[in-house]
Amino acid sequence: MKLSTVKLLVPIVAVAIQANSASTVIPPYLDHMRIPVGLIGTLISLAPLLALASRLPVGMAYNHQRARFLVSIAILVMGATNYLYSFATDSLSFALVHSMNGFVYGAVTTLYLAFYVDSLAPDENRNHAMGYYVGSLAMGYSTGNFFGGLIADHWGYALTFQLGAFLSPVSAGFLWFLHRADGGTKSEIKKASGKLTWSESLKALVEPELATVVIVAMFLNLLHQMGGVFISLYGLAVGMTLTQIGIIRAAYAGCNAVTRPISGHVVNKLGHKGLSYFGLPLQSLILMLIPLFSGFGTILLVYVCSGFLRAIVIVANAVGLVQDVPESRVRRGLASGVYNAAGDLGNILGPSIGGLIAQATGVASVFVIGSLGSTALFFIVVFLVRRLKGTVEPQSLAS
């Protein structure tokens, strides 16, 4: 990996630490405020809902030359909203702060993914570069999860939110002074950075290759958020501390970083499309085992196995975004926006559906009913897309 690529990854790691130090403790924080479990899922869904609202406009307006400045501003605003979490003491104030945080987080991640890909050196391996990107996010998520739970356990929720906010100026400052590594010729960047028309945007949204990647991204995040939110509440129910919950979430997120050395080889050997389609149902089966256990060690082991599988599927799907979605038909900023928007939709549905299941049948059943239902719906949507568009041939799954 080139030094220029390492420099590009540092700011997004800091953003991930900031985001996940908060997300780890938010479900217990809301539970501490005596908010009903069904409403907890709804409130948590507000952030991805607002992130979803930001994705397409930001992606369409993406311009490589302005991206660094815009991301820096968005990171600073995100830090300010993180700080405000410590003053949210009821459901209404939390909903307002969480919505603002989600909107700016959506803008940051949409802009940064496009900026990262466009800024790669011409001779950098794109498949490996996407693996590095996913792995770096995982490193940040894992670090944020661990320290979020640890700080909240020993010094309270407010300090967790406030310390996370202080990472914003560090990340924005590093990005501002970052020397951009050109990912193509100036003419290519200029062409890719032009403003999109609505007709171009609508055509891009129905690109078959993009639709395939989008479906996988949505269901990956649906499972991820359903498990992430309710593993915290399940852990509290079986007597775990916030530190133990943070360790479980950190280990799960860290799987992306650990599997980085092998994920590229696995994807090359088995094919990114096959892994994208069939890895997700396998992850569902693993998550269904969680209610069988109540001990910290066994739950940690099961959740880590789920994380390893998810990590490989994420890399496979990210490779699909780069390889299967040509910039000649779908411009980079919009592709990034649609890809992240799909993930946001999964982030919205996961906590919301999980909250309804938990309210009706208990927190433990979320892992069984939610996983089974998600897998069934995933195959139904894939089947409908293949029928309507006729773009995914049976033999392509093995490619």
Image (cartoon, helix red, strand yellow):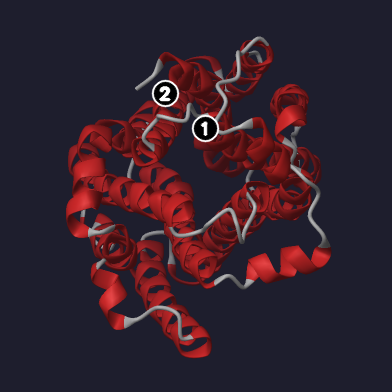
Give the amino acid at mark 2.
Answer: Thr
Up-down relation of residue 293 to residue 117 (above or below): below
Q: Are marks 1 and 2 in contact (CB under 8 Å)?
A: yes
Up-down relation of residue 104 to residue 387 (above or below): above
Q: Nearer the viewer, residue 368 or 388?
A: 388
Q: Position of residue 294 (x, y in %)?
A: 24, 48
Q: Is residue 267 left or right of residue 92?
A: left
Q: Position of residue 361 (x, y in %)?
A: 44, 70
> How packed is label 2: few (under 14 Cα within 10 Å), some, or many (20 or more)?
many
Q: In percent of the image, x 38 and y 26: which residue is there?
A: 243
Q: Position of residue 167 (x, y in %)?
A: 61, 15
On-image quarter of the C terminus: bottom left
| Residue 143's disc number | 2
Q: Which residue is mark 1?
A: 20
Q: Secondary structure at mark 1?
A: helix
Q: Earlier in the sequence, mark 1 or mark 2?
A: 1
Q: In percent of the image, x 45 and y 32: which residue is there?
A: 137
Give the amino acid at mark 1.
Answer: Asn
